Amino acid sequence: MKFINREKELKAIKEKLDGPGLDFYVIYGRRRIGKTTLSLASVKGKEFVYYLATEENNLKKLKEVASRVEPGIKYVEEDLEAIFNFLKDKIIIIDEFPNLIKENPKVVSELQMIVDVLLANTKTKLIILGSSISMMESHVLSYSSPLYGRKTGQLKLRALRFSELADFFPESTTEERIEIYGFSDGIPFYLEKINYPFWEWLDEELKKVDSFLKSEIDFLMKYEFSDVKTYKKILDAIAFGNTKLGEIKNYIGTKGTDISPYLRNLIDVGLVERKTPLIDNVKSRRGTYYIKDNFVNFWFRFINPNITFIEEAIFSSNEIKEGYNRYLGFVFEKVCREFLIEKRDTLPCQFQRIGSQWGKIPKREKGKNQYEIDIVVLNEERREIGFFECKYGSLKLKEAKDILIELKKKSRYVDWNQESRKEYFGMIAKKIEGKGSLRKDGYTVFDFEDF
């Protein structure tokens, strides 16, 4: 995998490696996020031992790998303390550390003793990586872990921002990058696989006998969950618009079963997020569930329902393309939120909080029972509030004005400092005719020309 972006993360790790004493650095995040690429980039030009842990015989394999750097290590015992004693003052990278834990749960306590005693006054640089977020947080980083307080640095590696996709596809338009983002999110592994133009590549990939698309979700989920089948049912339900707890239960046929622990686990590993209205209690009963990872969402929307046809090589990207714009509506909201955060210092409302807002319309008014506003931003100190709609389409001036008028109407339902707040209204779309005219009228509007 090529190394693109991650300059801040790379700098942080290199500073640790160049330090005078012992360093114990922890890097974790979902599979395919680029942990290995980042760690190897940080030690480029240096001598190091890199070991990818498996599910068995790890001490034997670690010795074999280390012997390529230090041939004499093959004579020491197959014992973690003996191996680390031989590798003192070296750079050691252990990838997929959770596999060591699965093979021998005592390895965490053994490593704690090694860090505390054996390596305490050395120049050893130890980097451990893990794809199982739940295991890394519970066995390595939690207060109850023997390793708690030993690390000198930690990094939970996250997906790249949408704006960084331009580095992968410099010839692409904003619209093309949004189409790619809807498939890949900001996951470097998928971005590296894509050949431009996207739709031609996807069509070829769908027809491959050994396409990674067929088994990728099972590959990702087996690192976190034992009951993969139930988790897949829940993600399938959410992908098709069942965002409330009751709706999910009905969809998967578990009305009398508590699926809350499953949802909490999906949230903990970053696959699902629970959203509540921005102006509401975090424990609000109005919470809804969404798939956080675009690739996972894409897979359940377009790959999973058609897996038989994909296996038979009779499914094409054109069938995805037919419903893709509707799917991208949700993806576009994520892009718009990131865009506003990046533009924050130049906006009329320099907000401190950002989110979505929805709720009931008072009974005295006719029409719909619910209102929804795509993005709301707040500056509580100044009592300023901004309302934005996101439209993944091209709008004529009248259409844009009508949407903004409706937005102003919906803003009245938002119960926050009603008597003393300063309000701003805006919109983000593919193309807005008469954008300048709307800006003169005081609206904060953007389209792809501004990206």
Image: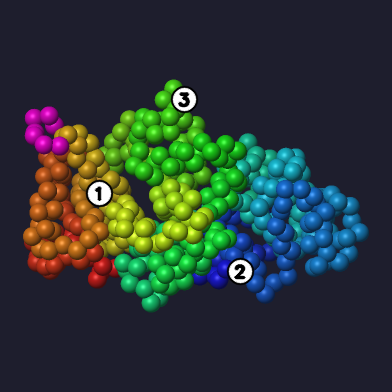
Q: Residue at x 15, y 43 (%)?
A: 410
* Residue at the outermost bottom position: 171
Quarter where residue 367 is shown? top left
Q: Main secondary structure of the magenta part?
A: loop
Vertical arrangement, residue 150 with respect to residue 348, above or below: above
Q: Earlier in the sequence, mark 2 or mark 1?
A: 2
Front residue of 335 and 245: 245
Q: Which residue is mark 2?
A: 41
Mark 3 nearby-residue class (10 Å; few <14, some 14–19, many ≥20): few
Q: Quadrant of the N terminus?
A: bottom right
Pair 1/3: label in front: 3
User: Who is closer to the viewer here, 1 or 107?
Assistant: 1
Q: Which mark is nearer the camera, 3 or 2? A: 3
Q: How many numbered badges does the structure rendering display?
A: 3
In space, the residues marked 1 and 3 are separated at their CA atoms by 32 Å
Numbered range of the magenta stretch: 362-368
